[in-house]
Image (cartoon, rainbow, N blue to C red):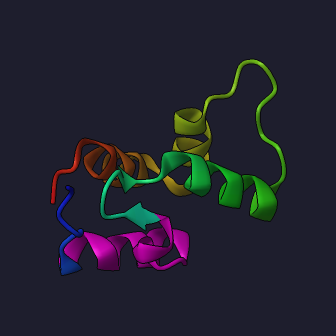
């Protein structure tokens, strides 16, 4: 079972992406990257063109710090 994200990373996620982190968090599986990816596509359109990854899109749209937030969430850190 994953620990819930701490208030610091939850705040950063909200500031950067404008969404509550708990919308993308499952206590058994942790951060739901697929659900997050789907939400980004719904908001910004399908960015996958065969060369653009989710990481590339997040970096270009939100910056390197946003990539760090997602990587920490995927790894269950913080």
Q: Residue 8 in the image: x percent, y percent?
A: 20, 76
The segment highlighted magenta reads 8-24
Q: Main secondary structure of the magenta part?
A: helix
Is residue 1 found left or right of 25 in the rendered image? left
Q: Nearer the viewer, residue 50 or 76?
A: 76
Image quarter where the N terminus lies is: bottom left
Is the residue 14 above or below the residue 28 in the image?
A: below
Residue 27 falls in which quadrant of the image?
bottom left
Q: Nearer the viewer, residue 21 or 69?
A: 21
Q: Is residue 77 above or below residue 19?
A: above
State the residue at coordinates (35%, 51%). 29
User: Which quadrant of the figure contains the C terminus?
Assistant: bottom left
Q: Is residue 15 magenta?
A: yes
At x 40%, y 69%, the residue is 13
**Quarter of the rendering containing residue 36:** bottom right
Tell me how many marks there are: 0
Q: Position of residue 30 (x, y in %)?
A: 33, 54
Q: Position of residue 76 (x, y in %)?
A: 22, 50
Frontmost residue, 50 versus 5: 5
């Amino acid at each position: 079972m994953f620990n819930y994200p701490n208030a610091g990373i939850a705040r950063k996620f909200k500031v950067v992406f404008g969404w509550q982190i708990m919308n993308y968090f499952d206590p058994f599986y942790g951060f739901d990257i697929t659900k997050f990816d789907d939400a980004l596509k719904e908001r910004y359109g399908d960015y996958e063109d065969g060369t653009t990854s989710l990481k590339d899109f997040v970096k270009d749209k939100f910056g390197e710090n946003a990539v760090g937030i997602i990587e920490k969430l995927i790894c269950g850190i913080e």
